[in-house]
Image (cartoon, grey):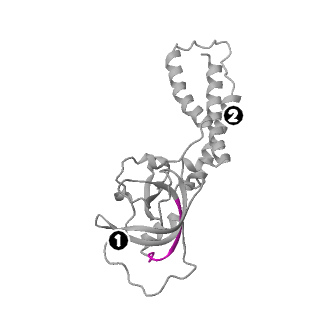
Amino acid sequence: MTATRMRRLRAALLLAFAALIAKLFVTGEVGKYMAPTLNPLTAATGVVLAGMGAVELLRRTDHRAGHAPEPAPDHTTDEALTYLLVIVPLALGLLVTPRTLGASALGGDHIVPLLLTFPAGPAPASSVSPPPDSRIEDVAQLVASLRRGDPTRGRRVYARGMVMRSDSLAAQEFALLRYSITHCAADARPVGLLVIASGDPGLPSGQWVEVEGVVSSQEREGSALVSINADRVVAIEEPADAYL
């Protein structure tokens, strides 16, 4: 391959990767790969790649006067394999719609060890009902309240997540599953809540739902599970902010 063709190919790959990053931002799919805190860095990476591609495309191959370019050694096979390793994931990123991790990523039927638990010890006594405006909004706020040690039992909660069924749970019970990521989907960690509905909701594993109810505690296998006594379970589409 001539130097000019190599230069054009490198420019095309750099610009294609920049286009992939732009596509993820435009379609809102970047959140399926990266944590929102990394969006500025990801966008800057796309800008740098676009600049490098433009420079590579506009750069001319200059030779010193009176000197012919030396013939490049024949590494056609090695070059083809190298570019193939780059082009295949790039093409998949441009052509395939990404999906978030689902309930099937965990595998197995025994999911109780994956569910959130209250700290060991007696539940804090409280004779005062939580104020009406103390509703917990979604799983992230509930997890944050538990980490701070805030009282959560008896509070109204609204949460979204995926249904995860298991033979170890009753028919009216399921785990509400979300994944928490620090940097990207590769470091995703499951966060599960036990949901107790008034009856069998008849929803398959992997279905996204919206749950509203009251935070409670259920004893299972010697642990006090963070549970939701649900009075409303509604199937929904996968939200844009699927990860915590």
* Image: magenta residue range: 150-160
Camera-nearest residue between 39 and 97: 97
Res. 119 mark: 1
Q: Residue furthest right?
A: 58
Q: Which residue: 50% across, 59% down?
A: 201
Residue 85 at what x, y percent from top left?
51, 28
Horizontal and vertical percent for residue 17? 61, 36
Give how far apart the Cα atoms at labels 1 and 2 are. Answer: 56 Å
* Element marked by disc 2: helix
Q: Residue at x 57, y 29 (%)?
A: 87
Decide if residue 244 is in sight here: no
- Point out residue 155 in the picture as x, y percentages from the top left corner: 49, 76
Q: Is residue 210 magenta?
A: no
Secondary element at image label 1:
loop
Q: Tell me the amino acid under the disc marked 2.
A: Ala
Q: From this view, report whether residue 164 is shown above or below residue 11.
A: below
- Looking at the rendered structure, which numbered label has been put on residue 54? 2
Q: Count neighbours of disc 1 (C-alpha within 10 A) and say few if under 14, some if 14 to 19, many if 20 or more.
A: some
| Residue 195 sits in quarter | bottom left
Q: In this view, does 132 lie above or below 147?
A: below
Q: Residues within 10 Å of mark 2 (few under 14, many from 20)?
A: some
